[in-house]
């Protein structure tokens, strides 16, 4: 009977390493899931700002603000209104911040800048 005296070396990740990687992915996944609605809202605001800025029927600032308010009602976004729009030189912009509670003691703050393309 032949016995081998060589010890095989273990390759790969250990249990503790696996748990650390799993924890890191869990934290990142939680942050991503909590931030997803804010980014969806941002893309809605961005598309609305672009559409309104290039609408030839909207002649003055009042019409632009009213159209923005109507679209925000359709999209069920109540945190912002047409009063918050910056309108100058044919560019319509909306700058705002969104706070997302991650835990009781941690908050994620995201700055959004939605501006129409010229």
Image: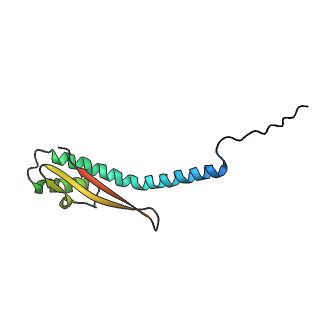
The colour scheme used here is rainbow
The x, y position of residue 20, in whole percent, is 59, 53
Nearer to me, 60 or 94: 94
Residue at image position (26%, 49%) is 46
The image quadrant of residue 34 is bottom left
Residue at image position (12%, 54%) is 63
Image quadrant where one finds the N terminus: top right
**Left or right position of 23 against 5:** left
Residue at image position (44%, 52%) is 32
Nearer to me, 111 or 72: 111
Residue at image position (44%, 65%) is 106
Image quadrant where one finds the C terminus: top left
The x, y position of residue 105, in whole percent, is 46, 68
Which residue extends farthest left?
59
Which residue extends farthest front?
6
**Left or right position of 76 against 66:** right
How many discs mark residues in the rendered view?
0
The x, y position of residue 16, in whole percent, is 64, 52
Which residue extends farthest right?
1
Nearer to me, 44 or 23: 23
The image quadrant of residue 94 is bottom left
**Left or right position of 110 against 95:** right
**Left or right position of 18 against 36:** right
The x, y position of residue 10, in whole percent, is 71, 41
Nearer to me, 103 or 37: 103
Which residue extends farthest bottom?
105
């Amino acid at each position: 009977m032949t016995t081998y005296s060589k010890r095989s070396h273990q390759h790969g990740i250990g249990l503790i390493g696996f748990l650390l990687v799993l924890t890191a992915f869990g934290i990142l996944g939680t942050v991503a899931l909590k931030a997803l609605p804010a980014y969806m809202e941002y893309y809605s605001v961005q598309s609305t700002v672009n559409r309104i800025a290039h609408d030839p029927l909207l002649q003055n600032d009042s019409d632009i603000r009213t159209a923005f308010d109507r679209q925000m009602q359709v999209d069920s976004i109540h945190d912002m209104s047409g009063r918050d729009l910056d309108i100058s030189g044919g560019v319509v912009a909306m700058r705002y911040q969104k706070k997302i509670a991650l835990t009781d003691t941690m908050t994620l703050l995201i700055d959004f800048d939605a501006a129409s393309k010229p």
